[in-house]
Image: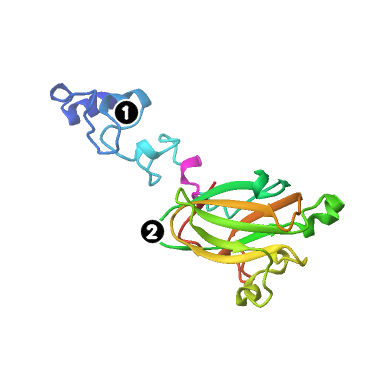
Amino acid sequence: MDGWSKIAEDSHIGSINTTTSDQDGDGLSFSAEVAAGTDPNDADTDNDGLNDSEDTHPLDGTLPDTNTTAPSTSRLINLSTRAYVGLKDQFQEMVGGFGITGTGSVKLFIRGYGPHLAQFFGEGALSDPMVTIKTFPGGEEVLVNTQWNASDSEWSEIADEYQPSTAGDCGAFITLQPGLYTTEVVGENGANGIGMIEIFTYDDLTAKSGGTVGNEVHH
């Protein structure tokens, strides 16, 4: 008696639906296992610790299985954009948006560049930026910042490369609940030029690094 005859005998093939029956509980029907060459009575044909339906190479336990690779831990921690910025009453503000998912709050670091960009754009850089964050669609202002405050205690936790270095640039910390938000950068006191806004998850910028934020920021 050959191997398949033995399988058919053990499985009582004449009394089962070979299209849908899953004798060994591995997620593959009897007919699918026959087509693949795996054992319908053994959930792990090659004895490598993976069910046949999860196994990239179900007939050879010596071959690596791509689906055993650990899932990626990469995630988004920063959003930024740069554009020409003018006066709000002339509809020249730079507007963006972001959303926060999850059930808890998340602490963010907001940085608005203007004077710092003079090293790249000279007099074309925005000399006096103001950053505003509003709820969407309600429009409630939750942050208005015109210049970073060196006395904020959080600066001692932020890695040096992320700290504003030029007077007149914006920088602030804010804790927000899940929801949608709008960001605006405008020129104060008649200023216009190239500006930039950046949004970071606070825990990922600390000098200690490696922090895990319970929520994710989406653009």
What number is the disc on residue 182? none
- Viewer-closest of 199 and 1: 199
Q: Is residue 141 above or below residue 81?
A: below
Q: Position of residue 76 (x, y in %)?
A: 56, 51
Judge left or right: residue 63 versus residue 37: right
Q: CA distance from mark 1 to mark 2?
A: 43 Å
**Residue at 61 percent of width and 71 percent of height:** 208
Q: Is residue 150 above or below residue 81?
A: below
What's the residue type where badge 2 is placed? Thr
User: Going by the picture, which residue comes out furthest to the front?
Assistant: 89
Q: Main secondary structure of the magenta part?
A: loop
Other residues around mark 2 within 10 Å, as few (<14) / some (14–19) / many (≥20): few
Q: Residues within 10 Å of mark 1 (few under 14, many from 20)?
A: many
Q: Position of residue 86 (x, y in %)?
A: 72, 48
Q: Does 68 lie within the magenta span?
A: yes
Quadrant showing the N terminus: top left
Question: Which residue bears the numbered disc 1?
Answer: 33
Verify CB contact (< 8 Å) between mark 1 and mark 2.
Answer: no
Q: Is residue 216 magenta?
A: no
User: Which is more toward the observer, 136 or 90?
Assistant: 90
Look at the image and give the residue range highlighted in magenta.
63-71
Which residue occupies 57% across, 64% down? 202
**What count of labels does the image hold?**
2
Q: Amino acid at mark 1?
A: Glu
Tag 2's secondary structure? loop
Instruction: Please tell me which residue lies in front, 149 or 154.
Output: 149
Q: What residue lies at 59% left-to-right and 57% top-to-bottom?
A: 132
